[in-house]
Image: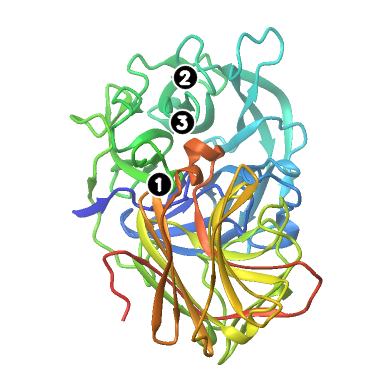
Amino acid sequence: MTKAVNPIIPGFYPDPSICGVGDDFYLVNSTFSYFPGIPIMHSKDLVHWEQIGHVMDRQSQLPLEGGRHSQGLFAPTIRYHEGVFYVICTNETSGGNFIVTAKDPAGPWSEPFYLEGADGIDPTIFFDEDGKVYYIGTHPIIENRQYDGECHIWIQELELETMKLTGKPKDVWSGSMRFVHWPEGPHLYKRDGYYYMLLAEGGTDRNHSVTMCRSRTIWGPYENHFCNPILTHRHLGKDYPVQCVGHGDLVETSSGEWYMVMLAMRPMEGYTTLGRETFLAKVVWENGWPVVNPGIGRLTDEVEVALEEWKPGKSVTESRRVYPFGEMEELGFEFVYLRNPDPEKYRLCPGQGLKLQYDTHTLMEEASPTYVGIRQQHHYFQADAVVLADSILENQETGIVLLQSNAYYLRSALTENAGGEILLRIYLCENLEEKRIVEKVLTDVRNEIRLSLEVNGLTAGMKVICGAAETDVAQGIDIRSLTTEAAGGFVGCTVGLYAVSKIQTQKAAVYKNFIYKTQDIVVE
């Protein structure tokens, strides 16, 4: 037995989908308007995970220009069939539903095959035993619609050779209960002569749930499971530590054990900065239906997995990460950008650091400002960065930012005034309005400046170190606005570095390093 700790992938890793190939497991998540898109994780024990790449790592694959923060890539599904991996997904910003393929899950993945006539969101793909392939998706009911969120799950045959839908589509299911909202995210499995359809229902908020139906034929009629929902936390009250449980996917191990991955949220005092995270549960089959965490019926802090423990080379749950940019040849897979970045604005220079070219696009725009970051994975953490003082210029700003979206963020801003002094400003942006919290003239500035952002649950603070002097610039900043509950959308926070300019320039801010650590880890 190996013991998993929930969430198995903390931070902004929503809408998990999983497949098993022999003794290997592969998992993907939604990324919305971040680039690269769809991280792909690998594990051998369902407990420890490493990121091996991205499914959508080329600009040609992933048009995101002009998309809102919570548009872009919705709810991917990963499947494996006869030597080929398939990911099917929705690009809400451009193109709609598509399929990409690869023989190696680490890539490269194909250019997207956009599916003509595939309306709606959250598609999945199913390979039947007779060789036929099916598309299963979600679309809203248009005619005689009674309420917002009234949807159908529909099925149509898919011709793999041409990547085109063929035959007639059929609406097969509209949810497990009367007046159910947002039946979506379907996944189809075949077991003991039944087609089982797993769904997300109730919307991806406090009423989220996992439900199931089944049929003897793929076209239905589908039989509702009387125990639906098979997993939810909506009945546990607003103060329960894990909320919004739903959007599951099932996987069977080579020894016949079953598990489910799903998303859930861990709010603090009713507010969530981390977004939707990936959790794990044990599944057994009783009387032809799955039972999630039998005898418990909810998610647990730990899950015993009947697989031998496996240690990845680099875990996605590391609590201390040090990035000495001057010694790095490339950034790790954990780094993300906004929409379609210009790679020329991000340069790793040996012996110097990471050069971020100042850009006229601001963080407030639905564009691709110069920004690179990683996901916030802990409620309590510290992010430090060392920037070269001579790269801080008049009419430019650079620093650390805790980013929920273009409308909600907290940023530090180093700049130079007309007199040659270096200033540090702290801004909180709420609903596209920036408020300056503090401005400080830095003294004893030498070659380097260290910025330190500390997040303590729902408050944040900023320190600056110049030479031997450490200064508290701001403490106790309320960041409840940087949460799903206040800002809306489907994303969690990322934390990273940015560079913005009032004028066109080729100049760059130069960062020696970046460190992310939980608060109980001491940086040497």
143 on left or right of 154: right
Determine whether 121 is above or below 355 in the image: above
Circle 1 residues within 10 Å: few <14, some 14–19, many ≥20: many
Which amino acid type corresponds to the residue marked 2 in the rendered image? Ser
Instruction: Pick whichever of labels 3 and 1 is earlier in the sequence.
Output: 3
Q: In what quadrant of the picture does the C terminus appear?
A: bottom left
Q: Quadrant of residue 251?
A: top left
Q: Which residue is mark 1?
A: 278
349 on left or right of 208: right
Real-space Cα separation, disc 2 to disc 1, in angstroms: 29 Å
Please name which of the two marks, 3 or 2, marks the residue nearer to the observer: 3
Q: Secondary structure at mark 3?
A: loop
Q: x, y percentage for residue 271?
A: 41, 39
Instruction: Pick whichever of labels 2 and 1 is earlier in the sequence.
Output: 2
Please name which of the two marks, 2 or 1, marks the residue nearer to the observer: 1
Q: x, y percentage for residue 480?
A: 45, 43
Q: x, y percentage for residue 211?
A: 41, 24
The reply to whether discs 3 and 2 touch (Cβ–Cβ < 8 Å) is no
Which amino acid type corresponds to the residue marked 1 in the rendered image? Thr
Q: x, y percentage for residue 523?
A: 32, 77
Circle 3 residues within 10 Å: few <14, some 14–19, many ≥20: some
Q: Which residue is mark 3?
A: 205
Circle 2 residues within 10 Å: few <14, some 14–19, many ≥20: some
Which amino acid type corresponds to the residue marked 3 in the rendered image? Asp
Real-space Cα separation, disc 3 to disc 2, in angstroms: 29 Å
Instruction: Pick whichever of labels 3 and 2 is earlier in the sequence.
Output: 3
20 on left or right of 140: left
Q: Which residue is mark 2?
A: 215
The reply to whether discs 3 and 1 touch (Cβ–Cβ < 8 Å) is no
Given residues 136 and 270, the one toward you in this image is 270
Q: Secondary structure at mark 1?
A: strand
Residue at 71% in and 10% down: 143
